[in-house]
Amino acid sequence: MRKILSLLAVASLLMLSGCAPTIGTVLRQSRFSELRPPTTLVPPGTIIQVLDKDPTFVNIVCDRGDALGDPKLHESTSENVRLVAESEGTLKLSGDYLEQLRANSEFKWIRSVSLTLSNVRVYEITDSTFFSSVRNATEGCRQAVKFRISQKQPIALVKSVMQADVRYSIIFDTATTLDAEARRNLVKNLAMKLNADVTTVTENTVDGQALYWGIRTDGKLARLITPDTVSADPSRLERLARAMGRVMNPVRATVTVVKPK
């Protein structure tokens, strides 16, 4: 509780001082890795290749359906409350992210981009649900995971996500000579970079729905989807689970030895 209050105090002081916290700061405080750009493509249960960390850039190895079928997701109510509190008010894009966008000459007139989140949710897949669903992995997914491992490329299971709607507000440089139509076109092109909904574009705002902003991952669980581990041998899964600090109910077989007469 003290940690949560301290995080809220920091966010409040930043806002009162006129320095809005970044979305990356809010996510890191809750131990989420920031996704750039936010996306709808990596729900819990997705297998990803991690291309870069902090912020996180990913390549999808298996979508959730190919990896686990249609597993039940758990909504974390307590984390929802905390993240709503931490993300209230105006946030901003990280400075380095804004500079990356401004490197495109089309966006040079953008001075800042702020965002307001709503409908904040945290969804996760539990360990028990994973182990109940892992045999639903398609052959294509198993082979894809095996290939990435053979290439020594880091893979992970998306274990939980922070999802939210957003309204981006764009402030232009005062020196710009862009008219209203030109600004709308610029915001539309920016919306595509940020995975926002281009149908909601105005000359200085655009909205996005149900975007994943941050993820938590588990590399050990992702490796259990390979052909060598997804097998008819339940004892192998049990040993792997115990090695990860988890205990599954063992499945034992009774063998009767019949001596020849």
Image (cartoon, grey):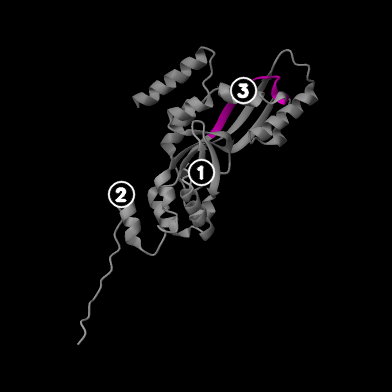
- Secondary structure beneath dot 1 equals strand
Q: Quadrant of residue 94?
A: top right
Q: Classify 175 as above or below 115.
A: above
Mark sitting earlier along the chain (3/2): 3
Q: Residues within 10 Å of mark 3 (few under 14, many from 20)?
A: some
Q: Which residue is mark 3?
A: 99
Which residue is more in the foreground, 135 or 196? 135
Q: Which residue is mark 2?
A: 243
Which residue is more in the foreground, 98 or 38? 98
Q: Are marks 2 and 1 in contact (CB under 8 Å)?
A: no
Residue 49 tag number: 1
Q: Could you tell me which residue is drawn at 71 percent across and 13 percent down?
A: 174
Query: What kind of residue is marked 3?
Result: Glu
Q: Is residue 5 left or right of residue 93?
A: left
Between the C-alphas of marks 2 and 1, the distance is: 23 Å
Q: Could you tell me which residue is drawn at 67 percent across and 36 percent down?
A: 197
Query: What kind of residue is marked 2?
Result: Ala
Residue 184 located within the stretch drawn in magenta: no
Residue 246, horizontal then vertical, whole percent: 31, 49
The span shown in magenta is: 106-119
Mark sitting earlier along the chain (2/1): 1
- Secondary structure beneath dot 2 equals helix
Query: What kind of residue is marked 1?
Result: Gln
Residue 121 visible in rendering? yes
